[in-house]
Amino acid sequence: MPDAPYLIAAVTVSAAVTWALRAVPFAALAPLRSSKTIEYLSSRMPAGVMVILLVYCLRDLPLTASRALAPLVALTVTVGLHLWRRNALLSILGGTAVHVLLASMIFVH
């Protein structure tokens, strides 16, 4: 069994590393708050992330099969709800509900 000074040193080093890893993001974010690049990215990235998610979710969708109808109808409902109400939560929940209903009840594989 290790002796007491070794254990104290190990705990001290572990605590210091943990504290530093938790403090570094806050110290790094302070100068970025006034950055024009970060301001630009924060206004453009949400749409970019949504496009990436859309491509990722629909990448393996066979457009000739009837099972492609459920995701495409759900996508249409999601976009329509969002354009109509401008509420992300409503759009996501509505599109998800339509997809689950269509995929489990109508377009069963």
Image (cartoon, rainbow, N blue to C red):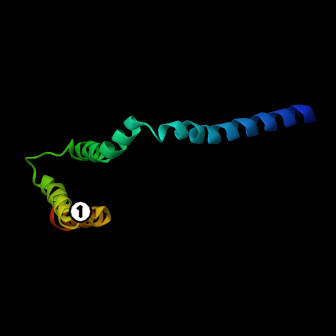
Of 102 and 34, which appears nearest the observer?
A: 34
Residue drawn at (28%, 65%) of the image: 87
Q: Position of residue 45 (x, y in %)?
A: 32, 43
Q: Quadrant of residue 99?
A: bottom left
Residue drawn at (55%, 36%) of the image: 28
Can residue 69 be seen in this snapshot? yes
Q: Is residue 94 above or below residue 35?
A: below
Of 57 and 23, which appears nearest the observer?
A: 23
Can residue 108 be seen in this snapshot? no
104 sits to left or right of 69: right
Q: Quadrant of residue 39?
A: top left
Query: Which residue is situated farthest in the right direction here?
Result: 4
| Element type where label 1 sits in the image | helix
36 sits to left or right of 97: right
Q: Quadrant of residue 104?
A: bottom left
Q: Position of residue 41 (x, y in %)?
A: 35, 40
Of 37 and 52, which appears nearest the observer?
A: 37
Q: Badge 1 is on which residue?
A: 95
Q: Dot 1: within a 10 Å radius of its alpha carbon, few (fewer than 14), some, or many (20 or more) residues?
A: many
Q: Position of residue 34 (x, y in %)?
A: 46, 40
Residue drawn at (69%, 41%) of the image: 19
Amino acid marked by disc 1: Gly
Query: Which residue is situated farthest in the left direction here?
Result: 64
